[in-house]
Image (cartoon, rainbow, N blue to C red):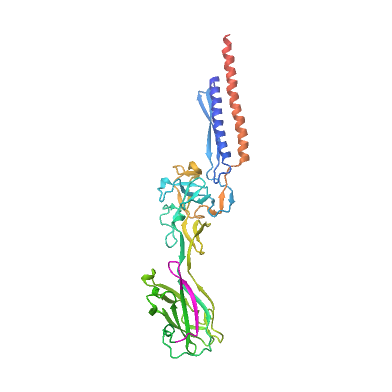
Amino acid sequence: MSLYGALYTGVAGLSANGRAMAHTSTNIANVNTVGYKGSRNEFSSLISSNGSTSFIGGIQSVSLPQISAQGNILQTSSATDLAIAGQGFFVVTPTPLQTPLADELLFTRSGSFQKDNAGYLVNSSGMYLQGWLLDANGEIPTNRNAVELVNLGRITGASLPTTTASLRANLQSSDPITTPYTAGDIAAGTVTARFETAMEIFDTQGGSRPLRISFVKTAANAWQYEIMYDGAAGDIGGAGNNPIATGSLTFNTDGTIATPAANVPVTVPFVAASGLAPQTINFSFGTAGQANGFTQFDTTSSLYGSTIDGTLYGGLNGVRIDDNGFVIAQFTNGIERRLYKLPVATFANADGLRIGNGNAFGQTTQSGSPSMKNADEAGAGKIASKSVEQSTVDIAEEFSDMIIIQRAYSAASKIITTADEMLDELTRLKR
């Protein structure tokens, strides 16, 4: 190698170690960046030879991203902070794309998501979270690549109409028999009920509607009931449509109910003027031969309890994400509703991904195409809610690397100064 070759080798050393210092500095600067994946400096020699006695040496620095490395999982208090324990990435886009194309998708481990003013979940880098929109049955799309923006602004409230009503009560066995009795006499006012109880049901628009159920004893171990709608008469087309249901209860000699069986359908005949459609409710009076519903013992007729499903309207109160990746809306009336499921995207070679802005990565030919999977399935990592993944940078290791790089840089500079002095000595030989 000539002295000029030594100069070029020194310059190559300065350049390579300068680039290595830049990579190390980037690692150190991102030591607290959520989901950041550090890179490792690698050096390789460059030799240009001319025969066996003449060559020019050089060096190059390469940064090898450690994208598949796992960072520590840190617990947080935010319901929308997410981390992945294991392989895979959250699917994001840099802008709020409702149905992005495959080449518009990016992938990240930065899971510090928050709801913005439009209802979208956005992380600290401004990346918009994408997920599977669940259908009416709570199922994900057949096409696993059909992801959409996770938008909590698409729903403002929820309610559940009443579909079942279970009653627990006793009818006094020693009550006198009422005769004559014809179905509808209690509603018409010609017969006085021996026992009545009121209840509230919930309609399909989140409103509360009053019902009343009345009983008379018509024979030994036999009772008749009438169910009345106690709301505005116009809701059911006039008072003449009461009672909305009638029926009979019979009891065994041990006081347990004999008939009817559970789930007696009762339809509240709402008319169009009420803004509602007719609503069917399954009433349960108990299980035949058991004392878990209505009974007939010689004690005062009383209602012991009732279980009526449905809720009033409730506004959106918050959101949570469970370990299976379901995005669940929470409402003020206690309802929880699954809206989306978050896929975990895996790659054949995650370290081959392209590094982009915002701590996000893009697919390349080296990484392969993403495979959208359910969390904790087929090699995909498990989603940890109320957690974030810390940077994989080890600051002690980075500072040690800085010292080594600094020494190598100084040594390369010495090559240049020493070669310069030797060239200067060579030029003085003519004097």
Is residue 269 at all visible to an observer of this figure? no
Q: Position of residue 285 (x, y in %)?
A: 49, 79
Task: Locate the C terminus and report the quarter of the image it occupies.
Answer: top right
Taking the magenta stretch, the answer to whether it contains residue 261 is: no
Is residue 178 at all visible to an observer of this figure? yes
Q: Position of residue 51 (x, y in %)?
A: 50, 23
Q: Position of residue 156 (x, y in %)?
A: 46, 59
Taking the magenta stretch, the answer to whether it contains residue 205 is: yes
Q: Residue lying at the far left in this picture: please name it.
A: 272
Number of marks present in the image shown:
0
Whether 208 is drawn above or below 175: the answer is above
Q: Which residue is found at the position 60% from the left and 42% from the top?
A: 394
Task: Locate the N terminus and report the quarter of the image it occupies.
Answer: top right
Q: Nearer the viewer, residue 159 or 76?
A: 159
Q: Which residues are magenta?
A: 191-209
Whether 90 is drawn above or below 167: the answer is above
